[in-house]
Image (tube, grey):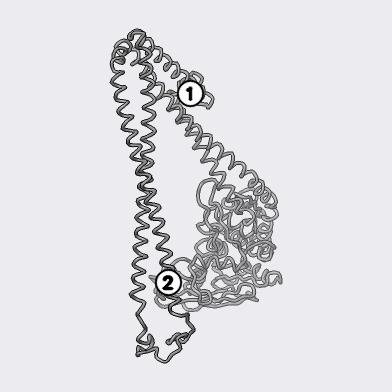
Amino acid sequence: MLVGVPNTGKTKWLQLLDYLFGDPGNQPFEGAEETGLAEKYVAAGVNLVLGDEAFRIERRWSEPGAKTKVFVDAKGLSTSEFQDWLLNALNIPVLHFPRGNPMSGQTWPELSFRMLLRHVYRQQRFWGELADRQPEPEQLACLLQFLGIAEKLYTDDYGLLVSKKMEVERLKLKRDQYNETLGDVARDVVAQPGLSVSLTLNGVQKAKRQVTADIEHLRESRTAVLERGRDNALPAADRSRVSRLTQRRTEIIGVLELTRKKTEESNIRLSELSVYRGDLSEELSRIDRATDAGFILADLKITHCPACDQTVAPDGTDPTHCFLCHQSVQSEPLLEELGVVRLKFERDRLSGELEEAQDLAKVIEREIASLSLQTKQAEEELQKLEEELTPARTSIGGLVQAEISAIDMSLGQAGERLRQIDRVLDALDLGRALTEKILALEGEIGPLQERVVALSDAIDYEAMASQLEDGMNEYLNAINGLRPGSWKHSPIAISISRSRLEIRVGARRWTSALGGTDTLYFLMAYQFGLLTLSNKEGSHYPGLSIVDVPGEFSGEAIEDKENFIIQPFIDLMHDPEFLGTQVIVTGASFKGLADVNRITLTDVHVA
């Protein structure tokens, strides 16, 4: 118990403890720039006992580079690392939770120790909510963590399930928008009476078959018109000659296309071969330089010691051992011969490859020359055929030009429409791919959904909620026993689910059912109820409660008159099952309370 008259620093000490518990701020006290406390002190620490282990936690705000760090046994951690360390030391699982609707698309934040601390540490200025300025989804997640439910709900499977469901919804929306846009754009292109409502694969394929048949009919009509014009324009004796010339012209055009393609491929191969020959030549040049360097450097000898730089000479030494390091060596001629043989082998290999590449280049060059000659001959023959066919074309064109032009225009329109229909079919394939992806994801969602639902159904929310509910009502019974009539309302009832926390007093929510004083009793009961979770199997409440009691409780100055609000905590601490738990409470006096560790603050600090 921290006791003392107002302004003796009780709240400041608790704020300092909050700062030691990983507050990400740079200063140890709120308003430190006004009070000068951050300048008066250079560091702060606390001895923290977790189970059977003791740790020294420190903050050093005047040390360069240490303002945002928490030191655990002199090891510096960032505030986020310290929170993870603390959760691990308390055997509280690190997990992420949905802040609101899981399908909202928001990222799931980590359920940090600082979030939990808002329920553990009741600040003097926050006596109106379960936790100060904490959104309801976060409050629910903290309470589920304390009850040991969160780790069964916010599993990796649940996160993956939500992610896959969101992906399915995005794909469905994308597919609907895609189909709607495609239908608006492509309906006029397809122009099928049966596609006035929706664009379907069968309808588009039917339209393609119709356009293909129209193109074939137009081509047949064009051939018929040309043949009729030929029969009318040319004598019977010239018709077979014109047919032969036309057929020959078609053959020559095919030959030209083939020779030009082969020529292009040969030129590419020749270019690649030229690069390869250049690389081989450079490698040969490097081998020749290495050989020359070997001859030049072979006679260089060690004349000075590399350690002391004194002159050395091989006189009087055994030639089978190095005169400098005295290790056994191969005979010098053998070493030289091995180097020469290796260089000669590499040079011969590169020379052979270069010669082979040069021979291959000559073959390709001859092939290119032959193809060029064939191309020239074919072009000359094609020009002669064009000249011989010109009179016949002129005669036929004069008779059928208008019909042919109309047919060619229709062919062009039909061809373009056919290409557009092919593009629509490709687009429909993309839509089918989206559908297949959706079906695949839905197939993965099924097993995930079953596992998540099975795990959730196995949770007895009512039984878990009753643990906290019983603890809160136990406190209210206790203060009524100590001071009859303190709590005149109905018992507290708690309802918890995956997405909802509801605490009622009678038939109404506690926030609307209770007045000012009763709210203070209710929140003290909440602190007490949380503390009773400390010995429950599977729960994750850390066994610590810090309560900064308001200066006046129920309108009266706190001395011995309000001891009854603290006595239930003292009695709970006497229970062997709660050995190791701790409650830190502030107050003006609390005279007469036994079995407490009282720290009295006497110095009044005023501005």
Instruction: Give neighbour class at mark 2: few <14, some 14-19, many 20+ (Cα, 10 Å).
Output: few
Q: Secondary structure at mark 2?
A: helix
Of all residues, the one furthest to the bottom in this rendering is: 316
Q: Nearer the viewer, residue 574 or 482?
A: 574
Taking the spot 36% from the left edge, 69% from the top edge, the residue there is 291
Compared across the picture, whether 167 is left or right of 313 comes to right
Taking the spot 33% from the left edge, 29% from the top edge, the residue there is 378
Residue under label 2: 339
Q: Is residue 390 above or below residue 501?
A: above
Q: Position of residue 295 (x, y in %)?
A: 35, 73
Residue under label 1: 208
Q: Nearer the viewer, residue 569 or 481?
A: 569
Q: Position of residue 66 (x, y in %)?
A: 43, 73
Kind of residue at badge 2: Gly
Pair 1/2: label in front? 2
Q: Is residue 190 above or below residue 48?
A: above
Kind of residue at badge 1: Lys
Q: Is residue 392 above or below residue 348?
A: above
Quarter of the C terminus within the rendering: bottom left
| Figure quadrant of residue 120 | bottom right
Taking the spot 36% from the left edge, 82% from the top edge, the residue there is 301
| Figure quadrant of residue 349 | bottom left
| Figure quadrant of residue 563 | bottom right
The reply to whether residue 269 is in sight is yes
Quarter of the N terminus within the rendering: bottom right
Q: Position of residue 172 (x, y in %)?
A: 53, 37
Taking the spot 37% from the left edge, 84% from the top edge, the residue there is 302
Total numbered labels = 2
Q: CA distance from mark 1 to mark 2?
A: 74 Å
Compared across the picture, whether 343 is left or right of 592 comes to left
